[in-house]
């Protein structure tokens, strides 16, 4: 049997203006990433203080190549979050025309630096730099982005070590809202190495039935309409509309796009999807703050592992 709002959508009416929708689907609840991230960051401050007292103050190095304005904003926010948590941080800015050898040398120096537990190379890199070579240079033990082959492989095999921050943050959002993916239809739109692929692996590890859609998928809406949990990471403004969403679905919007008027919007058309879904992330204030929180979590974890290694070594 169809839900009433689906019938209204077939009639071309905006479901928000109908009067007899079931209350549970009238308006999706917000998955408030900003509030959850703030809460987590207060906990991380305490963990940082404890590690600092053990002589292992967590430290993150962020490498930014070139002057991509969006990357500059992301990097600034990441470094600020480290500072607020009491962590050590370094921001290494290299010119857009830097040679590959120079980038590799800088990363190798960070690999050896005992103050640095996490290394993040902000993507995208300028086209002349071989991204795979750069990411392979980051020590797997300091790879807080989870992009190194060893960490990607560990996640693929179901033994995660460092997990990419955005999909990890999405899993925490679901957990905080009491949404268990087990046995659910999860549809991930986007197959990037940063979000789509690791997201699919995490949902699979949580026992969801997972479909990955991408630019060559035929009849995208047929897939998205089956989703109990819909994660959208395609980088196209407001691509997913209310008629593409199953009533009562949980909708996670990883997109961050700038409109011509300068305002931000996601990959999901919030106005038409919110009345159909049961939960939805706002943009901004949904997934973005969770990504930063998970970067802090991974860096603290890396520092913890370094402390354990050091103390193990000293005890021998
Ligand atoms: N560019 C967009 N998202 C990310 C991310 O999570 N990590 C890095 N390093 N670069 C990015």
Image: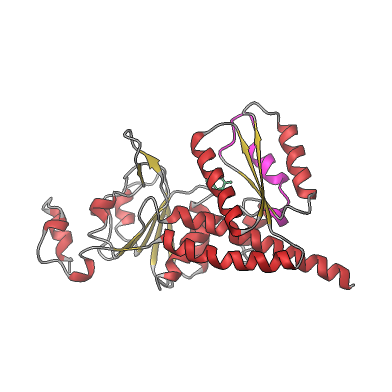
> Foreground: 291 or 183?
291
Residue 310 colored in magenta in the image: no
Instruction: Say whether residue 220 is left or right of residue 137.
Output: left
Looking at the image, is 127 positioned above or below residue 43?
A: above
Quadrant in which residue 209 is drawn: bottom left
Could you tell me which quadrant the C terminus lies in?
A: bottom right
Q: What percent of the width, then of the height, locates residue 268?
A: 33, 49
Instruction: Say whether residue 154 is left or right of residue 268.
Output: right
Could you tell me which quadrant the N terminus lies in?
A: bottom left
Residue at figure coordinates x 82%, y 69% from the top left: 311
Residue farthest toward the right in the current orientation of the protein: 316
Residue at figure coordinates x 72%, y 57% from the top left: 141
> Foreground: 229 or 138?
138
The answer to whether residue 5 of the structure is visible from this angle is yes
Residue at figure coordinates x 69%, y 59% from the top left: 58
Q: How many labels does the image show?
A: 0
Q: What percent of the width, then of the height, locates residue 154?
A: 64, 61
Q: What percent of the width, then of the height, locates residue 296?
A: 59, 58
Looking at the image, is 133 positioned above or below residue 49?
A: above
> Foreground: 305 or 124?
305
Looking at the image, is 146 positioned above or below residue 123?
A: below
Q: How is the image coloured?
A: secondary structure
Quadrant in which residue 23 is drawn: bottom left
Residue at figure coordinates x 30%, y 54% from the top left: 222
Instruction: Say whether residue 43 is left or right of residue 108.
Output: left
Q: What percent of the width, then of the height, locates residue 90?
A: 67, 46
The answer to whether residue 181 of the structure is visible from this angle is no
Residue 137 colored in magenta in the image: yes
Magenta stretch in the rendered image: 124-143
Instruction: Say whether residue 141 is left or right of residue 221.
Output: right
Residue farthest toward the top in the current orientation of the protein: 97
């Amino acid at each position: 049997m169809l839900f009433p709002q689906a019938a209204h959508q077939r009639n071309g009416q905006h479901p928000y203006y109908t009067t007899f929708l079931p209350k549970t689907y009238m308006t999706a609840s917000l998955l408030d990433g900003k509030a959850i991230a703030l809460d987590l960051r207060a906990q991380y401050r305490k963990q940082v203080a404890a590690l600092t007292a053990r002589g292992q103050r967590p430290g993150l190095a962020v490498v930014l190549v070139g002057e991509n304005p969006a990357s500059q904003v992301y990097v600034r926010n990441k470094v600020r979050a480290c500072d607020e948590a009491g962590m050590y941080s370094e921001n290494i800015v290299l010119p857009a025309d830097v040679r590959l050898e120079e980038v590799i040398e800088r990363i190798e120096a960070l690999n050896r630096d005992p103050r640095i537990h996490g290394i993040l190379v902000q993507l995208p890199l300028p086209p002349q730099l071989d991204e795979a070579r750069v990411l392979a240079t980051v020590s797997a033990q300091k790879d807080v982005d989870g992009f190194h082959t060893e960490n990607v492989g560990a996640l693929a095999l179901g033994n995660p070590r460092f997990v990419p921050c955005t999909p990890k943050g999405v899993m925490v959002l679901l957990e905080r809202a009491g949404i268990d993916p087990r046995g659910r239809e999860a549809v991930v739109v986007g197959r990037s190495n940063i979000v789509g692929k690791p997201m699919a692996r995490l949902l699979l590890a949580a026992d969801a039935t997972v479909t990955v859609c991408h630019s060559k998928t035929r009849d995208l809406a047929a897939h998205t309409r089956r989703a109990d949990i819909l994660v959208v990471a395609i980088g196209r403004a407001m691509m997913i509309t209310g008629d593409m969403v199953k009533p009562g679905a949980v909708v996670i919007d990883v997109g961050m796009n700038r409109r011509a008027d300068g305002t931000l919007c996601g990959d999901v058309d919030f106005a038409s999807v919110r009345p159909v879904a049961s939960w939805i992330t706002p943009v901004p204030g949904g997934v973005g703050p969770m990504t930063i929180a998970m970067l802090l979590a991974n860096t603290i974890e890396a520092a913890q592992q370094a402390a354990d290694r050091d103390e193990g070594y000293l005890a021998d």
